[in-house]
Amino acid sequence: MLNFSRWAVTAILLPLVIGILCAVPSFLPDTAVERLPSFMQTRVNLGLDLSGGSHLLLEASTQDVAKQRLVNMEEQVRTELRRGSPRIAIGDISSRDGKLSFMVRDPSQVDAAVERVRPLTQGAGLTGQRDFNVEVVNSSTIVITPTNAGIDNAVKSAMEVATEVIRKRIDEMGTREPTIQQQGGNRIVVQVPGLQNPKALKDLLGQTAKLEFKLVDTAANPSEVAQGRAPVGSEVLPYLDNPSGVPVIAVKRQVMVSGEDLTDATQGYDQNNQPIVNIRFNGSGGRKFGQVTSQNVNRPFAIILDGKVLSAPNINEPILGGSAQISGNFTVESANQLAIALRSGKLPVALTVVEERTVGPQLGADSIRAGLMASIIAVVAVAVFMFVSYGRFGMYANLAVAINVLVILGVMGMLGATLTLPGIAGFVLTIGTAVDANVLIYERIREERRRGRNVVQAIEFGYKEASRTIFEANVTHAIAGGIMLALGSGPVKGFAIVLLIGIATSVFTAVTFTRLLASRWLRAKRPTEIVI
Amino acid sequence: MKLLKLVPDHTNIGFVKLRHWAFALTALLTVLAVGTTAYRGLNLGVDFVGGLMIEARFPQAVETDRVRSTIAALDVGESSLQQFGDPNTVQIRLPLPEQGGAGAANAIVEKTRNAMTAQFPGVTFSRYDTVSGKVSGELIQNGVLAVLLAVIGIAVFSWFRYEWQFGVSTFVAIMHDLLMTLGFFAVTQLEFDLNIVAAVLTIVGYSINDKMVIDDRIRENMRKYRKMDMKALIDLSVNETLPRTVMTSVTIMLALGALLFFGGHVLRGFTAAMMLGIVVGTYSSVYVSSSLLITLGLSPQVSERKAAKTNIADRAERTGPRDDGARP
């Protein structure tokens, strides 16, 4: 068992060499790495706690999605029944308790109404599941209830769109290598390394960026508007910068043009050098905008963002040609942010930050330095101790540990795993425990020597008997690591990754690699006595 | 060359003899730890209770009282301050506003930043954490679940692998390690956050490593010396593995010591937890889990039956003739 065939030697050394080579790029500066072949460019990612940056967990309200769908459905039903032919007159339509209900005025039209409404409620999926159930109660009231499957689908697709919109927005900010991932049913994790200003990021992601242009209802009674009451067909919206001093304004419910018709948005300046956002509409948006502005010259219209009025300029002349300006009380920064948000489209659902972790680049750099320092000191201390305790064999163990550290880095690079601060702790601990396997073996060899076995036999038995124990111990350790990886979040996961990789590599280097070294030495020197 | 030996050859300490004392001491310490945890509670970080954490770094040493009064003047809720090893860094914890979501949390961060910058020129903010109550609840749940499942998984593994007594004794010993660690955090009031959960899981992993090595030796000796009295056998096994136990503990302590002194303040609680865990884990391996096997009535005959059930080649290797006598 101390004899290794040429093949065995290759099989042992090759993975180690590959592992070490994979670790090399992690130590090189960026410019040097770029010149390496692409398969050599894998490096260990540094976690945000080491590189500095922000981790945000955003959560969408599923209730919002459900509510929004109901509002859309209301609009569709209205159009289908009132404007379609033959016209079906309906009474008050209301969406309360998550249901949409309305009365058909002429009872003989109830069946026809159900027929017309039903196609609207069909799910888009192929499963044949309905998104809504339609039923008739009290012979003339139709109730439309969303099904759970329908809501789930809607949330799912909303989250997909939201993830995409967020990706666009963050790319627009010019940050490098962001991670944007959906997590669970209604959450999105955003990780942006090296970020200096997390507030701007949060502001940008917190904006739904739903842009609408609506006409101002000039006929509304100002004192009623101030109390929050608007005439039929109009609504009262907050308008903080209202020159009249009242922070609200009445606008028509009907949307002239919305953000969906935008093709581009950029930050610019108006004639007074105030920051504004220039927007361009697509063909149909431009036509609609031109049409409405032609008909309403000298009347004000409101620019509404996320339900708040930004400004309400007068239409001095018809705005043709498909471009317009959004004025508001902007700074260059906020105008730029709005431009980015508008370019990347509106979020289908509002997102709130439920978890934020931001680490300044300075602290990150300090942590790396401290971690490196600790690792080096740990390696040196352990190495000296091992040498003092086991002599030549201690050096074998040290060599194994050194290779082990490199191979862990290499494997992490290959897997694209992220090194975090607890990961460094895991590393240091791995250095401590990696020698455990060797300690087991060497203590066993000492024991066998005391029992009177000759050198070769003692070493052979030492490895053989200890290997079983090492295996048992590491399997159980790996169980703990696996559970950490599966259930843990954040630091627990970062730690578990290093731990698991460390367990696998340390067993290999500590048992197989040192045995190879020992056998080479035995064959070369054929010692009759060993110092261990 | 003379090599260092921490444990002299032929060490023979009667661990089993001491087991009743050890059990009493262990039980007492465990009760104390649980009592302290229940009475004083843990200093849970924002990971687990939700809230807002800002880490401020001052150009020179700063009195926490001044920081406290600066923040108290802002009316942003009750703050709790913690100073790390170096007197230049202060961690400020604030409750999260109940309404207003992300915007309100942002506002508090801004407000605190501005007030601090005005009061202490040159201050920098190196870290913010904001965790909402909902997320922190899930983090607690997952953390506790991870620890419990790890312990149960390990106990089940050693039960299937060996006799049930090993599973039980390992489980008891690890629970002891966990409770002692909790007690340590209750006594020191060091912040208990997600990092610490990782540390606790490591302790579990290390402790199990330790116990497996001893258990494995006990099992081996049970096959080798079938007639030997169980108490003597366990003493023999623990003593035989003692050099390894001590050596490994020392190397890990060296590594953790480096981490404690040079690893930076962020990892300090983490490292302290692990160091304590190593001590506790080693103690419980030597004094608790192996001695407990006797109380649980483990006997070599049980192992005999189990060995017979496993494959023959395996048995032949372990029980076949071997010269264990001391040859000159």
Image: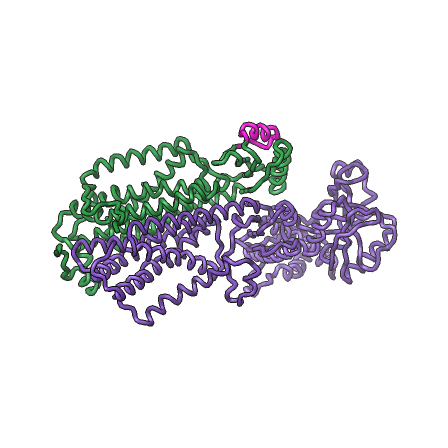
Chain colours: A purple, B green
Residue A382: percent from left, percent from top: 36, 49
For the point 35% across and 53% down, which residue is it?
A434
- The location of residue A238, given as percent across then percent down, is 73, 41
- To which quarter of the image does residue B180 belong? top left
Query: Residue shown at 84%/49% (left/top)?
Result: A271
Residue at the limit of the structure toward the front, as seen here = B1
Up the image or down, A183 lies above or below B115; here it is below
Instruction: State the extent of the magenta-drawn residues as a range.
Output: B62-80
Relative to B237, is B72 on the left or the right? right
Relative horizontal placement of residue B309, taking residue B260 as reference (left or right): left
Locate residue B262 relative to residue A441 in the image: left or right: right
Quadrant assignment for the C terminus of chain A = bottom left
> Is residue A139 shown to the viewer in this render?
no
| Above or below B100: residue B299 | below
Residue A145: percent from left, percent from top: 59, 53
Q: How many marks?
A: 0
**In terms of depth relative to the viewer, which is nearer, B258 or A331?**
B258
Q: Residue at x 44, y 60 (%)?
A: A411
Image location (x, y in percent) of residue A95: 64, 48
Answer whether residue B65 is magenta in the image.
Answer: yes
- The quarter of the picture where the N terminus of chain A appears is bottom left
Inspect this view and state whether residue A20 appears.
yes
Q: In the depicted view, which residue is nearer to us: A457 or B81?
A: A457
Is residue B98 shown above or below B245?
A: above
Camera-nearest residue between B84 and B24? B84
User: Does the magenta-highlighted stretch encompass residue A385?
Assistant: no
